[in-house]
Image: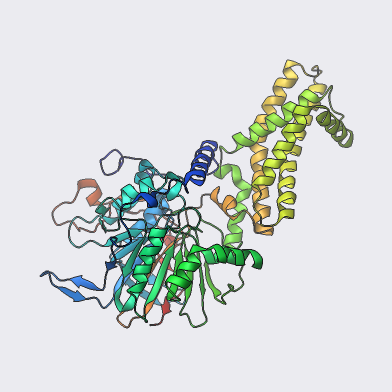
Amino acid sequence: MVGTPQFPYEPAGMVRWYSPLQLIQTARQVATSTFLGADFDRRQIDPRTSETYALFDFTTRTRADGTSEPREEIVLDYIADTGDGWDPTYAIAYTATRPQLELEAPDGQRHSTRRGEVLVFGGDQVYPTPSRAAYEQRLVMPFHAAMGWTEGDHPHLFAIPGNHDWYDNLASFVRLFTEKEWFCGWKLGQRRSYFALRLPHDWWVIGVDTQLGADIDATQVAYFKSIAAQMGPTARVILCTAEPHWVFEHEVEADERARMRRDSNLVFLEETIFQGRVRVNLSGDFHHYRRHASLDDRSQKITSGSGGAFLHPTHTFKQTPLPDGKTLRASYPDIATSRRLAWRNLFFIRHSPTFGAMTGLLYLLVGWNLLGGLQGYLHADLLPALTETCTATLRSPASFTTIVLALLGFVVFTDTHKTWYRYFGGLSHGLAHIGAALTIGWSIGLVAQAAGWSFGGLAHVGLTLVALFFGGWLIGSLVMGLYLLISINLYGRHSNEAFSGLGIPDYKQFLRLVVGRDGALTIYPIAIDRVPRRWKPTTLSQHGAAPGAPREQPRFIPDDDDPRGRPRLIEAPIVVPP
């Protein structure tokens, strides 16, 4: 697979979010996009206007003789938050591109579905930051290997960008999705970062580009106004956005929620432009599945962001009804499983082995500064030793400044909407690390004193510095894992930080939407509990497309007997009545 023109890169592993180099790279791109995004908005320099951009009509199909006929039904696949490790991304691509899927629901009923004629990417197509190479390795390679089409009819693909796609001001996204005609066997037609699709029975799919801060540019607003003007009184909209604004609004207090709705471009889009026609909201951003619905199922709000990226928890979010009355119907993974998976943070160093270099450096700086402020070995008794340490810290401006800056860093890192918890959690976390660093230095001091080494001598200082760095690597990682575990399971905070470091490739899912002949919309939430870790090449992969070989054969098939790798339905198919 590797080293060929089709596959120029090694299969990607899960992103190591806590790798020091990765943290620096991500922080740099986030800072650049945040400060310059508003001033260098790529959408503002596109010459296409709302009057010249297309509406994509799927209400008819072309016969073999070139004539057209009305479509009575259509299948659409929705995949969001792809492009992380090879195993989960290819597992989703492989499953979604099978011509037929036989799926079992929790009630034991079996359902047969066919591959979608349309595929919608729902945002964040690549992680951690966009580039030509990152898209190629983490998105193009898996989908190219999975599709395997060489001739015949091809489905269509549309994509909206998420915040990770915007980190390079959409440059790589535009090259891949709006300036080409093909993507791995799918036809491309969109020429901007948003689109509108007309489906049979007056269903519409609207894909919105909200940039980095829920910002919808004026040209996009004008385009959707022109689309809304073409909708009849029975039109029903499936609105695709890169962030589930209803979840963000639900998680904050009422006054903050009112402010968010007042300033939200998405609320303006739903209520003013489409005037209540939105029946289904689809979004990714959170890498799990959660569905809220009205009592009659005529309105659905679905977070579906498990297309390949690391898993997000479900137990940290409110389980109460949304402000508009929609109730939570399903979560995947379920609450108990999500809470159990959080305990993996106890083995934080295993999942993020290089992160300890940062805590090791922190322990080294704190301990070194304190060591310089001391005039002799600390007492063997703990309380006098702490008193002497505090005195030495106040006596040394460098030691005092180092500790204050370290504590402020932990306060800023703390994830919360409550000011009291930011200081409580941040200071507790910071003091735990500083206490661990002091304990390491104190323990080495006792060893050095017992060995008869002179205080501040080469042997004493050298051993202390080595112990601080490597002890900080190990103990600092343990403290970090404990802090994240306590924060997420007791206080419901740090959902992103506690699970991104774990890099869980399992519990992946996507949606298959079917507009039926009766005009009803049926949604199939398809899940893979455990993605395969082993893949074997097919004949097509080994020898090319030999005569008579199936044109839809993927290049790799699972070589894993675990039954949890078989696709299934998270819940019974969801029917939105006509």
Residue 337 location, x and y as percent? Answer: 57, 62
Q: Residue at x 59, y 51 (%)?
A: 498
Query: Can the viewer see residue 179?
Result: yes
- Is there any visible trace of residue 444 in the rendered image? no
Q: Is residue 300 left or right of residue 489?
A: left
577 sits left or right of 452 in the view: left
Q: Residue at x 42, y 46 (%)?
A: 169
Quarter of the image for residue 277 reads bottom left
Q: Quadrant of the C terminus?
A: bottom left
Taking the image as shown, residue 308 lies to the left or right of residue 352, namely: left
Q: Which quarter of the rendered picture does the N terminus lie within?
A: top left
- In the image, residue 66 lies at what x, y percent? 12, 69
Viewer-closest of 209 and 399? 209
Q: Nearer the viewer, residue 138 or 212?
A: 212
The image quarter containing residue 386 is: top right
In this rendering, is residue 123 above or below 380? below
Residue 513 is situated, as x and y percent measured from the top left of the image, at: 37, 71
User: In this orientation, which residue lies closer to the viewer: 100 or 270?
Assistant: 270
**Which colouring convention does the figure follow?**
rainbow
Identified at 54% across, 40% down, the residue is 23
Q: Is residue 222 above or below residue 85?
A: below
Examine the rendered structure and indicate whether residue 431 appears above or below residue 456: below
